[in-house]
Image: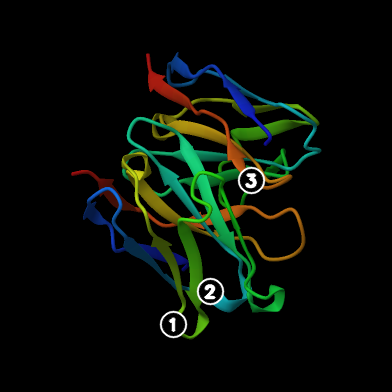
Amino acid sequence: DIQLTQSPSFLSASVGDRVTITCRASQGISSHLAWYQHKLGKAPKLLIYAASTLQAEVPSRFSGSGSGTEFTLTISCLQPEDFATYYCQQVDSFPLTFGGGTKVEIK
Amino acid sequence: EVQLVESGGGLVQPGGSLRLSCAASGFTFSDHYMDWVRQAPGKGLEWVGRSTNKANSYTTEYAASVKGRFTISRDDSKNSLYLQMNSLKTEDTAVYYCARVTSGSYPRWDDYWGQGTLVTVSS
C-alpha cells in the first residue's frame, strides 16, 4: 500500500498568513494526488486534483504543486473560512489512501 | 445541484450487521463510479471501497480492513448506493461518507461527498 505522510499534523496561523502543507508518498505516484478540506460535521470538499489543478469554484488563494513523491498545498492568504483539516489522497493505485491530516487552527 | 445523502447509521452490537444507503441526485448516477469513505472518532479519513458503473460491470474494490465483511452495491434505477456491513467490529465505529467519483478516464477523484452517517459498534 502507498503511505502518505502529511506535515505538519497541526498548524496555528493568523488570518492573512501564507500556509504550506506537505504530503510525501512512500513511492512515486506521478501527479495522482488530490487535496481535500474538511470541516467538522460537513462534507469533505475537493480543492485540488492532479496535484495542481484547482477544482471549480475553489478560491485562487489555494494552490498545489509537486509530482512523484513530494507535494505541497499552499494557502496564500489565510481567510477565516479556511480554518479546517486538510487531507491529501493518492489515487494512483488501490487501496486509495489518505494522509493523516493537517488541522489548521486560529492563532 | 449534486446531492448525496447517506442514511442507515445507528448503534449495532459487535458481530452484527447494518446496511447504509446513499441517495444521489443532481447528476446521472449511472455514469459514475462511487466510493465509500469513513472517519473514526478522532482519526483521519479512510477509504472503504469503490463501485464502478454498469459499463465496467459494477466491479468493486475494498480496503483490506473490510474485505470479506463489507459489500458495496448499487441500484441505478433508484439512484442509490449501498454498503452492507456484516461481522461488525468496534473498530468499524465511524462516520461513513459516500462520494461521487469523477467521470472520464484514470485517474479519478472524489469530487462530491455527502455529509455522512454515524455507525457505532458497541455492546
Give the left or right position of residue A63, taking residue B107 as reference: left
- Callout 1, which amino acid? Lys
Residue drawn 62% across the image and 49% down it:
A55
Discs 1/3, front: 3
Residue drawn 65% across the image and 34% down it:
A63
- Which mark is on residue B27? 2
Query: How did the renderer colour the structure?
Result: rainbow
Residue drawn 57% across the image and 43% down it:
A47
Label 2: few (<14), some or many (≥20) within 10 Å?
few
Discs 2/1, front: 1
Residue drawn 36% across the image and 54% down it:
B87
Q: Distance between the residues labelled 2 and 1?
A: 13 Å
Label 1: few (<14), some or many (≥20) within 10 Å?
few
Measured from the top left, where is residue A92 in percent x and y?
73, 44
Splitting the image into 4 quarters, where does residue A31 fall? top right
Give the left or right position of residue B32, taking residue B46 as reference: right
- Callout 3, which amino acid? Pro
Using the image as rendered, state which of residue A21 and residue B11 is in the foreground: B11
Read off the residue under disc 1.
B78
Read off the residue under disc 3.
A95
